[in-house]
Image: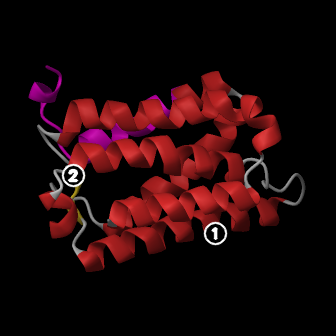
Amino acid sequence: MLNALYAAIWLFALWKWGDWENWRNYYPTILYFIIGDFLYLYLLSDAYPMWRYVPPIIDEEMGVTNSHVSLSVMLIKYPATILIFLSKFPTENTWKKILYILGWVSLYGVNELIDLNLGTIEHYNGWNFWWSSLFNLVLFSILRVHYRQPPLAWLLSMIFMVILWNIFNVPSYVFR
């Protein structure tokens, strides 16, 4: 139920502010965003999670799991985010760019705070809201880089991933 509400909100935002006409321009970055989350799900979600979605009881009774929520986030929230975030990204003035990214970090942060208060997301292994905020700051910065220079974004992502793995002492058994 809550998952459906979030999906409806993101679909409305996509309809209202998303750049549908030029979706092909953003498609590689949408895939990059989704692949990053799939990588997290594959490597860490079961073996050594940083966070996990916890469906509300009503959703759980309908058989909704962490995987279902993650998939709906990837298929609805991420494309909506990219089609809005990149299409409205300021083209001049560094401060406007920084504030724009911080606005999106705040939006994602508010979403996570709501989820934390509702008990629909849990943190593990040292992860917390502040790590999510830092992650989102890096994420939104790299999404913009990916749109302009995909190879550089992949390199920066790999570096950031290795840094996080070391900070959080991710065990080698996650590489199954």
Residue designated by label 2: 64
What secondary structure prevails in the magenta region? Answer: helix
Q: Which residue is at 78% across, 49% downward?
A: 87
**At 31% across and 37% down in the image, what residue appears?**
40
Q: Residues within 10 Å of mark 2 (few under 14, many from 20)?
A: some
Start-end of magenta stretch: 155-176
CB under 8 Å between discs 1 and 2: no
Determine the CA span between mark 1 and mark 2.
31 Å
Residue 145 pos. (x, y %): 67, 38
Residue at the right extreme of this rendering: 92
Residue 173 is at least partly visible in this image: yes
Circle 2: element type = loop
Residue displayed at 44% across by 54% down = 135
Is 165 in the magenta?
yes
Q: Is residue 141 visible?
A: no
Residue 63 at what x, y percent from top left? 16, 50
- Display coloring: secondary structure
Please tell me the numbered disc located at residue 103.
1
> In the image, what residue type sits under mark 1?
Gly
Horizontally, is 144 left or right of 52 in the view?
Answer: right
Q: Quadrant of the C terminus?
A: top left
Q: Quadrant of residue 94?
A: bottom right
Quarter in which the N terminus is drawn: bottom left
Along the viewing direction, whichever of 85 and 168 lies nearer the viewer? 85
Q: Is residue 17 magenta?
A: no
Q: Residue furthest front?
A: 62
The answer to whether 111 is drawn above or below residue 142 in the figure is below
The residue at the far bottom in this view is: 117
* Above or below 59: residue 70: above
Amino acid type at image mark 2: Val
Q: Residue at x 33, y 68 (%)?
A: 129
Q: Nearer the viewer, residue 121 or 22?
A: 22
